[in-house]
Image: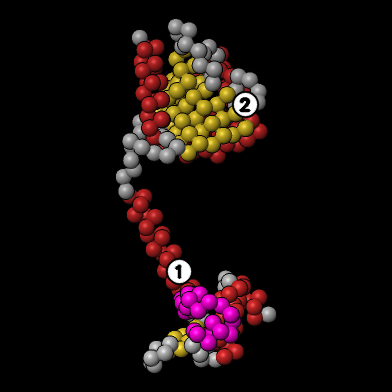
Amino acid sequence: MIQELLQKLGLSEKEIEVYLALFEHGKTTPARLAKATNINRSTVYVILEKLKEKGLIIEDISAKTLYVAPSSPEEVEGMFYRQQEEIKEKKKIAAKLAEELERLPQSKTYSVPKIRFVQQDDVEEFLFKNIGKWDEDAKATDHTCWGFQDRSFAEAYQKWILWSSERYSIKLNLLSNESSLENKLKEKFFQQRDFRLLKNNIDFSASTWIFGDYLIMIMTRQKPHYLVEIHDAVLAHNMREIFKKIWNDEKK
């Protein structure tokens, strides 16, 4: 029973062996423990140091020879209360550290991209869950979503378009191909949806949006549909500049 409890506390087999031998012999020296357990003396010293760190033993260094003894049951129980208080304090420090890290300026020249791939069965749910996040991120740049929207997306996800357009005020500057449905949506939400038809045989085969530092690509021209979300400030910035350039050229 005691061995099982000690294992649950994270003690190794040799640590348990030395600890129980210490109870059997009472206050004793590392050399005697090494002899009683048939464990190398240097290893016993390492084990005793670990047991001391865990609060399970105490050392008597008042004499020339080092003696060790088991901690009292009250001291063992008190050890775990102290650990709980230390954990609480570390949680407070970690929370404070997280707040301070949030205030630090993020590097705009290098970032580690975060990529998510979403299959057809989950695309619509993903759109509903993440539009708020994209909208907030876009507000930190120019409050505009740039890119290209294939007409097949509006045909497949009209419900989401209507829902998000009524709830979010982000401006859409999107290139598109000819679509009567997009024209109707533009008329209904004319203040925020601005679409321009592509000329010069430019052909995008999937929708591409840039919301702030998010780059979202959606394939809806053929099944199965899929979505790729890339969270990367550098990639998003470069794609936004490309679509701005195409947008201004199409206006001319």
Q: 10 Å neighbourhood of mark 2: few (<14), some, or many (≥20)?
A: some
**Quarter occupied by residue 238:** top left
Q: Where is 229 relative to 146, above or below?
A: below
**Quarter occupied by residue 192:** top left
Give the CA separation, mark 2 to mark 1. Answer: 47 Å
- Which label number is shown at residue 225? 2
Considering the numbered disc 1 on the image, is that residue within a helix, a strand or a loop? helix
Q: Which residues are magenta?
A: 30-53
Nearer to me, 119 or 172: 119
Residue at left 50%, top 12%?
203
Residue at left 38%, top 21%?
242
Amino acid type at image mark 1: Lys
Nearer to me, 156 or 32: 32
Could you say where residue 195 lies in the image, as x and y percent from the top left?
A: 46, 18
Instruction: Answer yes or no: is residue 123 visible.
Output: yes
Amino acid type at image mark 2: His
Q: Which residue is mark 1?
A: 88
In screen coordinates, is 199 left or right of 252?
Answer: right
Q: Where is 205 relative to 13, above or below?
A: above
Determine if the magenta segment contains residue 44.
yes
Residue at left 40%, top 20%?
243
Q: Where is 194 relative to 63, above or below?
A: above
